[in-house]
Image (spheres, rainbow, N blue to C red):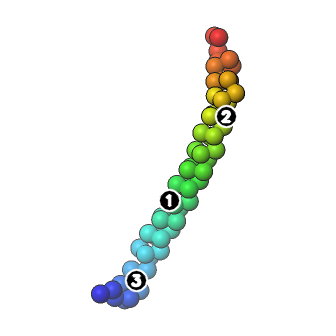
Amino acid sequence: MFDINIIADHWFWWLTTAACVVWYSTVTVYVAVRGVADIKSMLKRLGAGHGGTADAPGR
């Protein structure tokens, strides 16, 4: 089964792994939330008839 002594013997690697998982999860959730907000904003502009091309250089 699972031996608790493994964690005690390798505490540094368990802590490093846990920190990486927390960091990666935080970044993933942050990017997902910002992406959803960005997509909603783009869809709202497209629905209003402003595709964003009016401000493009050379138009």
Query: On screen, 21 above or below 38?
Result: below
Quadrant where the image shows the N terminus:
bottom left
Q: What element does badge 3 sit on?
A: helix
- The amino acid type, in three-letter code, at marker 1 is Tyr
Q: Answer whether labels 2 and 3 touch (C-beta < 8 Å).
A: no
Q: Quadrant of residue 13?
A: bottom left
Query: As shown in the figure, which amino acid type bears the numbered disc 3?
Result: Ile
42 left or right of 8 in image: right
Give me the C-alpha separation between circle 2 and circle 1.
Answer: 30 Å
Q: Which label's residue is closer to the chain start, 2 or 1?
A: 1
Q: Is residue 57 above or below residue 5?
A: above
Viewer-nearest residue: 22 or 34: 34
Q: Residue at x 33, y 86 (%)?
A: 2
Label 1: which secondary element? helix
Q: Residues within 10 Å of mark 3 (few under 14, many from 20)?
A: few
Q: Quick one: label 1, few (<14), some, or many (20+) residues within 10 Å?
A: few
Asked whether, in this view, residue 13 is left or right of residue 45, the answer is: left
Task: Tell me if residue 23 comes above or below residue 59 in the rendering.
Answer: below
Residue displayed at 64% across by 28% down: 46
Residue 22 lies left or right of residue 56; in this view the side is left
Is 20 situated above or below 11? Answer: above
Judged by depth in the image, the label closer to the viewer, 2 or 3, is 2
Measured as percent of width and height from the top left, residue 48 is found at 70, 27
Which amino acid is tagged 2?
A: Lys
Q: Which residue is mark 2?
A: 44
Cα gap from disc 2 to disc 3, whole angstroms? 51 Å
**Would you identify the image quadrant in which residue 38 lies?**
top right
**Residue at label 1?**
24
* In-front residue for pair 16/31: 31
User: Which one is earlier in the sequence, the residue at label 2 or at label 3?
Assistant: 3
Q: Position of residue 25 (x, y in %)?
A: 51, 60
Pointer 3: what residue? Answer: 7
